[in-house]
Amino acid sequence: MEKNQTQLPITIIRPKKTFSLNDFREIWNYRELLYFFTWRDLKVRYKQTFIGAAWAILQPFITMVVFTVFFGKLAQMPSDGVPYPIFVYVGLLFWQFFSSALSETSNTLIANQSIITKVYFPRLILPLSAVLTKFVDFLIASFILIGLMFYYGYTPHLLGFLLIPILLIITFMASVGSGLCLASINVKYRDVRYALPFFIQILLFITPVIYPASIAGKYSWVLALNPMTGVIQSARATLLGTTPINCLLLFISFLVCLDILSIGIFYFKKVERYFADIL
Amino acid sequence: MKPIIQVKNVGKKYDIKHYQGKYVALRDVIMTILQSPFKFMYKKAKVITGRETKEEFWALKDISFDVMAGEVIGIIGRNGAGKSTLLKILTGITPPSSGEIRMYGHVASLLEVGTGFHPELTGRENMFLNGAILGMKKKDISEKFDQIVEFAGIEKFIDTPVKYYSSGMYVRLAFSVAAHMEPDILLVDEVLAVGDAEFQKKCLGKMEEVTRKQGRTILFVSHNMAAIQSLCKKCILLERGEIKLIGDTATVVNQYLDSGTSGGTETVWKEGERPGNDVTKLISVRLCDRKGKLLPYAYSNQEIGVEIVYEVLQNGYSPLPNIHLFTNKGEHTFISHSDFTDDLDRIGRHKMTAWIPGNLLNNSTYIIEVVLSTMIPLQIHVDIRDAIIFQVLEDIESSKKNDFNQRIPGIIRPRLEWTVE
């Protein structure tokens, strides 16, 4: 019982300033909570939906079939010389990871407000766990891609396997970065979330998911400003060999996403201090 | 020995808008900017240059105190005194605007039992989730698993989703997880006010055991004077964001219950500060008996008068007071308004008293909201949320009969007529 006070951990609470490296150490200390939040979200989702985990497979699969019928067959959309189903599926896989992570992150603070106002933990844990949940969906949905690659007889470049993690990191940065901004805005302005699904839908059309970037001709550089363009183009290049890998494009995407992520974290930390007051 | 908690000059400032819990719609902000862009910029510029300050409000001012290891300290005060804000700052949920706090050891907080419980998950799954949210390690929860389940007494239902639990089972499981945390410092907010009497007794017992045997430091915020008196040796009385008194529990609790004009059972507004508009203004609200004597608190068998003094400032209106009674947990217990219609529309002061019969309220803390409104036109002129707050104590006669020495649950406790055939 008589612990020596000098051995006890000390908590100091002061008016909050901007963030420091300590914040990242704190997140590491709370990694178990990160795991539990992710686990909760997965568990609850698969318990609630009747077909459970199959949902993570069915959703992208059905989208792929619908897109193939309407865009591939009826609209005769070009697909850089590879069969349309596998072309669109690679795009969809990364797109859905990005868009679902984005919408989930931006809602996560509101969805967990009863916890935020009652217990302290590093708030960044919530958006991080939202992305991790979506990453699990991504992994499950990847099995269909493997199946499609067998079916159509594609073998990825060996380089491809090295590149995929980089593509995932870029997607992660893009979704977390913009998700953090939106999450913070969402707390203050509650009407933003109603506009978000619309906003994401528009984004889908300015990202080369259902069409190849080459379709834009001399204006394709406009698409390059969208970081997901680089990711999806490169994924197709490595997995399907549609085009040579454009390292410059990828590098630009990386830099853009790094900026988005920094702005996101900075803004989030800036407004974090009053989350509990206004939620 | 150094204190285990040191609180130095802590203050908390709120933006009035935030404090009222209103949120802003981006749509409205954009519309304001579009409709009158210059006015908006002018206002912004004024705020930035400091010529116009934002509307601010200090919920806590200059709070300083020390707590020694093993002490159990109660924090009391009426609604809005800053108790919850103080606790939220200590737990780190919201940062202070000034000052500094140092705490030695593992800190755990219990502002609500069952934080993060998810109805779809089973009891077992929620135990781990809730434990993690409260800052327990997975390893510790696994080790204490059997103890927690046994304390809650829900062995049979541990693998049932909690949405099928009765509210009693839910609370027992939630409290049981919390009771098995082993922090050096525990911050507790009113969580004992839940569950059935027997379980409450068990929880109080557990808390006492925790403090006596293991020398844990506890800060305990509550409206429940009985719980405060049985658990805490020392108390802090907060009033309007400041520390009014620190001392041994009996002294502080008496001061709190007796504090007539300084909050509690009488509120008087000075000329110029009276709430209202150009039709009517509220002057004072107080609790009194039939002789007109101020009641600092009431016994459960006693008749309670709520005396409202207000003034009418314009002809043609007859504003009438009505009272809303709430429990300290915010349950709306009843509304009462008078049936007078005539003769009250003349300009000047009016005094009306509403009589709450004896043997109706339970021994608990109640809050009275006072509203002044007119029927024609239908309009609310004054609406004071926490006009007065008062404690109803067990009357001596019935406390002799009630030998289990626990509060009887329920929002009210009317004495009913029973017949036998």
Image (cartoon, coloured by chain):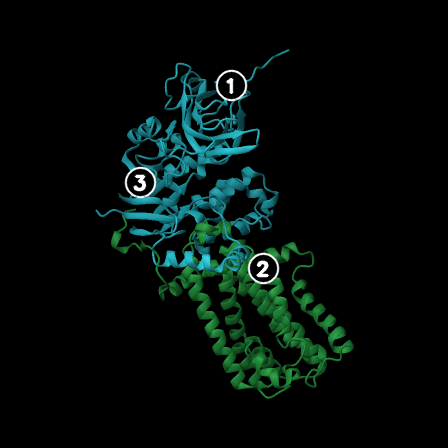
Q: Which residue is mark 2?
A: A42
Badge 3 and badge 2 both on one subunit: no
Chain letter for the part of the structure drawn in cyan:
B
Picture coordinates of residue B211 (x, y %)?
34, 40
B389 with respect to A161 (left or right) = left
Residue B144, placed above or below residue A139: above
Q: Which residue is mark 1?
A: B343
- Extreme residue toward the left, this view: B1
C-alpha gap between disc 1 and disc 3: 43 Å
Q: Nearer the viewer, residue B155 or A118?
A: A118
Residue B143 makes an appearance in the image:
no
| Residue B242's disc number | 3
Q: Amino acid at mark 2?
A: Leu
Residue ID at (58%, 51%)? B121
Q: Label 1 marks which chain's residue?
A: B
| Residue B267's disc number | none
Q: Label 2 marks which chain's residue?
A: A
C-alpha gap between disc 1 and disc 2: 67 Å
Categorize mark 2 by other alpha carbons within 10 Å: few (<14), some (14-19), many (20+).
some
Q: Nearer the viewer, residue A60 or A224?
A: A224
Q: Label 3 marks which chain's residue?
A: B
